[in-house]
Image (tube, helix red, strand yellow):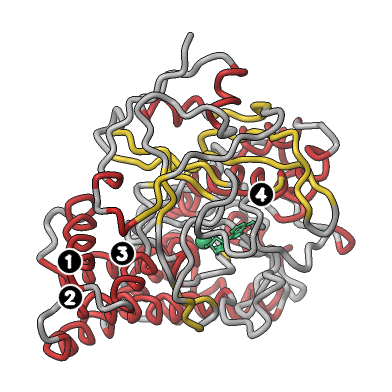
Amino acid sequence: MTLTIPFDNTYAALPDGFYSKLPPQPVKAPELVAFNEDLARVLGVSPGEAEEMAGVFGGNHVPEGAEPLAQLYSGHQFGTYNPQLGDGRAILLGETVGTDGKRRDIQLKGSGRTPYSRNGDGRAWLGPVLREYVVSEAMHALGIPTTRALAAVETGETVWREGGMPGAVLTRVASSHLRVGTFQIFAARGDKHSLRQLTDYAIARHYPGADGPMGLLRAVRDAQSELIAAWMAVGFIHGVMNTDNFSISGETIDYGPCAFMDVYHPHTVFSSIDRGRRYAYANQPTIAVWNLAQLATALIQQLEDPEAGVEEATEIVHAMPQLTEAAWLTRFRAKLGISSAQEGDLELVTSLLGLMAENQSDFTNTFRALADGTVRDQFTDPAAFDGWAEGWQARLESELDPPAVMRAANPAFIPRNHRIEEMIAAAVAGDYALFHRLNAVLAAPYEDQPEHMELQRPPLPEEVVQATFCGT
Ligand code: AMP
Ligand code: MG
């Protein structure tokens, strides 16, 4: 068997100013530690021997048909504009059109220095690579738009972080790597021509029906509103919603310091670098609007007279909070077993969330337990839940099959932080059993898997992960 990837590249055909063409930097002793056969099938990739795949996905061998390049972009990081970012440790190999007819990027992350590396080493260590592998695949199985993981390779090299860590490369798959920051860099330079080319490219690739820059803005707004609502519904905290990590396709991208909440609290933050708590759980819908406003600002720069676009762009951005809230409410209704819409539903949801915050309820297990009658145990004061449940039961009377609706909306399994940390520690010591087990269990998150109940358990006090670190 020989690895074949049916590349069909379009980004590499854009003008030079959009990227730097260069191959990934070779590594010492690449070893394939994970390969996603299901995803390979969707991509139309036929696998080869492990050694060959390690060479390709470790960056030592550029496969036939690839046109490797590092993409250029800029972005706001924690609210401050950085005029030049770009792929500092990633190389886009190219695109394939999958068996489902969808075009996707295949990118190596941790593949060495590029012209955009600034002070970085261009590398990644095994921890963040495996974290992204597990969490992005879990996200996919939860039914939430996301980049995916095709392969992970250990490089046989040491990467220096807090200390020496095993190096690794992740092969990331995305609908595209276009982000708000891709538009910002040309807007900031006043390069209307490139901005127009990029807009046409993004529309053709993601939203063929969209009408011009404002149509694109509307489409991104709609996709991102749905995405943020989906995150909120599973207790996901992205952690670094900078505009360079805000995708045009509406996929979750950049699993750096992300985490799923255990105990529910709206102000939860995990990221060690988010000192201002900008990207706290409950702030995500607001930050998404802020990011969309940056896209709007960038997009109107391509108009002959940008001022003329301000009114329409403002209107589009201002509609986002309502759209996100509507999508949010639909999802949280389903979490309560409700498929129809009634006055008072919002209050029903928010009052439960308020009680959960007061009672230190586990976010995932509380919602999952709603359907099986054990939910009172999730509250330090079960009587408080009983009071709420009276109104809820009354509301369910007019609903068809609440248990089925709840089970489809409330996962039993999420990638809990303490398990991710445990998995990374084991893998660093050469034991990949938990990595494979997590992938297998998280592939069916809405199914009861009694033999894996241990993975539903919230962390013990000594297991609680206090901070997560950017994927460096
Ligand atoms: P991120 O925090 O992953 O969104 O990355 C922000 C920017 O820093 C991007 O331009 C990355 O390519 C760059 N970057 C992050 N880590 C490294 C690294 N180890 N070496 C080079 N560039 C990096
Ligand atoms: Mg990023």
Task: Answer with mark 1 or mark 4, whichever residue precedes in sequence.
Answer: 4
Q: Which residue is mark 3?
A: 340
- Mark 2 vs 4: CB contact within 8 A: no
Please give the label number shown on residue 124: 4
Question: Residue 74 is drawn in which quadrant?
Answer: bottom left
- Mark 2 vs 1: CB contact within 8 A: yes
Q: Quadrant of the C terminus?
A: bottom right
Question: How much space separates mark 2 and mark 1, taking CA atoms?
Answer: 6 Å
For this orientation, the residue located farthest to the right is 462
What's under tag 4, amino acid-wise? Ala
Task: Answer with mark 4 or mark 3, whichever residue precedes in sequence.
Answer: 4
What's under tag 3, amino acid-wise? Ser
Question: How much space separates mark 2 and mark 4, taking CA atoms?
Answer: 36 Å
Residue drawn at the location 77% of the way across and 54% of the way down: 418
Question: How much space separates mark 4 and mark 3, taking CA atoms?
Answer: 46 Å
Residue drawn at the location 46% of the way across and 57% of the way down: 252
Please give the label number shown on residue 302: 2
Question: Residue 319 is drawn in which quadrant?
Answer: bottom left
What's under tag 2, amino acid-wise? Gln
